[in-house]
Amino acid sequence: AQKVTQAQTEISVVEKEDVTLDCVYETRDTTYYLFWYKQPPSGELVFLIRRNSFDEQNEISGRYSWNFQKSTSSFNFTITASQVVDSAVYFCALVNYGQNFVFGPGTRLSVLP
Amino acid sequence: SAVISQKPSRDICQRGTSLTIQCQVDSQVTMMFWYRQQPGQSLTLIATANQGSEATYESGFVIDKFPISRPNLTFSTLTVSNMSPEDSSIYLCSVEGTGGGTDTQYFGPGTRLTVL
């Protein structure tokens, strides 16, 4: 069975601090995809990144970076120099090829000015 | 990427009534998905809708309660039937990215439903 765990329910940081959101997943398949989505207060889901199970290279996109480690089944997300606009709920998700998405419970990030 | 619109964006409904939510995509897609997000919760898949076939429902969701139509490759509807306050949620339509397979999944803006 597939499962995604985001142990941090809520995180609060002060603007310009770095913050890491944890994601741990469970799957028996060797081919799978991991995702991060952002859900701001307006409610829409914004796609941030997709990573397949064969690509463990870390990725950086501006202030965002992702650390994928198959050895620990983790796909953590770091925001550098956080901003108030980063305040949102962040979801990690897993999908095995040909199957359905499984979302984690989400982490609510509050960035205070 | 895919641009997805949903109607209505929000509604307040009375117990026992039904609401049909529309999802329109700007490109043809094979699979469309309907999710529910209860207040403060994560997303739960309701069903997968393929054009020309019956929708496939996840455990805990039944066609009588959530009938789905998929008349063409760009449109789908989800009906929430005989509503109760427990149905108050955000309902989201989703499609796979144009790259096919599981490249990416894009979401509509959601329909925020409140049942009194």
Image (tube, coloured by chain):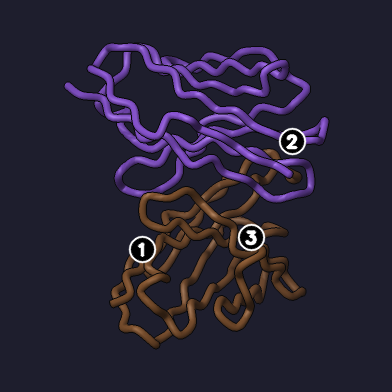
Chain of the residue where label 2 is placed in the rendered structure? A
Q: Which residue is located at x 72 percent, y 66 percent?
A: B50
**Camera-nearest label, 1 or 2:** 2
Chain of the residue where label 1 is placed in the rendered structure? B
Give the spatial CA distance, label 1 vs label 3: 19 Å
B102 or B85: nearer the viewer: B85
Q: Which residue is located at x 46 percent, y 62 percent?
A: B91
Give the spatial CA distance, label 2 vs label 3: 24 Å
**Horizontal side, residue A93 vs residue B43: left or right:** right
Q: 10 Å neighbourhood of mark 2: few (<14), some, or many (≥20)?
A: some
Q: 10 Å neighbourhood of mark 3: few (<14), some, or many (≥20)?
A: many
As drawn, A68 above or below B68? above
Residue picked out by circle 3: B32
Give the spatial CA distance, label 1 vs label 2: 32 Å
User: Which quadrant does the N terminus of chain B fall into?
Assistant: top right
- Residue lying at the far left in this picture: please name it: A113
Q: Quadrant of residue A103?
A: top right
x, y percent for residue B104: 63, 40
Same chain, labels 1 and 2: no
**Label whose residue precedes the other's in the sequence (1 or 3):** 3
x, y percent for residue A23: 55, 27
B58 or A63: nearer the viewer: B58
Q: Which chain is assigned brown? A: B
**Horizontal side, residue A44 vs residue A73: left or right:** left
Residue picked out by circle 2: A27
x, y percent for residue B45: 59, 57
Q: Quadrant of residue A87?
A: top left
Q: Which chain is assigned purple? A: A
x, y percent for residue A49: 56, 29
Residue B112 badge: 1
- Residue type (three-letter) at the residue carrying disc 3: Met
